Amino acid sequence: NAGVTQTPKFRILKIGQSMTLQCAQDMNHNYMYWYRQDPGMGLKLIYYSVGAGITDKGEVPNGYNVSRSTTEDFPLRLELAAPSQTSVYFCASSYSTGGPEGTIYFGEGSWLTVV
Amino acid sequence: DAKTTQPPSMDCAEGRAANLPCNHSTISGNEYVYWYRQIHSQGPQYIIHGLKNNETNEMASLIITEDRKSSTLILPHATLRDTAVYYCIVRPDYGQNFVFGPGTRLSVLP
């Protein structure tokens, strides 16, 4: 049981390049999330998904896209990378969004630098 | 969303109990209190959560006041590896966002 797995762990992008951060979970969770964390700051929600085929914007969605074709996978796409997207990205998942089973489990993070 | 207030930093001697307070005075009836920690920019690690009753697991204990307006996370025997930022979060009742504030930076000192 690996939990939430993110790849790559580190990446350097040039301005204007695009890339996809991969995220997979093996806990059969319905809900998946992408957060970013800037240095010294809290986590901010980028996008989330309530199930395969359903996604919605979070607090800071601009410059990103997501898809959810399967329950297990939730990739985050960065189009036309900008220096402001330099951050640590965390993927997460949960069985529910509230109640006793609302615990969110996080991956180990993907460090992205845009130069 | 209910908001939380935590002290920005705390120190604790190794081997002693670490008591981390959190105020959540606007919490509503069905909202759970969650605690996570983040060690040196690793992924946030779930510690414990509760609704009304005190809770204990292998990592920590959670004490919630009767009026639910505040809680305390207790690490019974802090070690150097417990040095981290600790986040107290009120989970919106079936809401999508888990709001992370600045948390408390706990330093366990030898």
Image (tube, coloured by chain):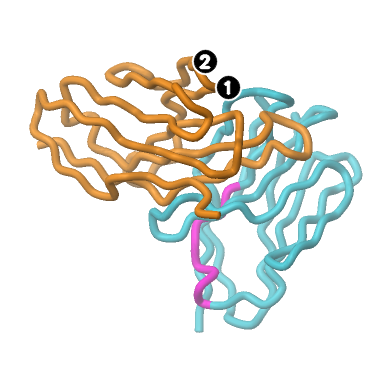
Chain colours: A orange, B cyan
Would you call the spot at circle 1 few (<14 residues within 10 Å), some (14-19), or many (20 or more)? many
Q: Position of residue A69 (x, y in %)?
A: 44, 22
In-front residue for pair B27/A61? A61
Residue B81 part of the magenta-drawn span: yes
Image quarter hosting the N terminus of chain B: top right
In-front residue for pair B99/A79? A79
Residue B11's tag is none
The residue located at (76%, 49%) in the rendering is B71
Provide the secondary structure element on which disc 2 rests.
strand
Q: Where is residue A107 in the image (x, y as percent from the top left)?
A: 45, 47
| Residue B13 found in image quarter | bottom right
Residue B45 part of the magenta-drawn span: no
The residue located at (68%, 48%) in the rendering is B22
Q: Name the residue under label 2.
A: A54
Q: How far apart are marks 1 and 2 (CA)?
A: 6 Å
Q: Mark 1 points at which residue?
A: A50
Residues rendered magenta in the picture = B80-87
What residue type is disc 2 on? Answer: Ile
Q: Are marks 1 and 2 in contact (CB under 8 Å)?
A: yes
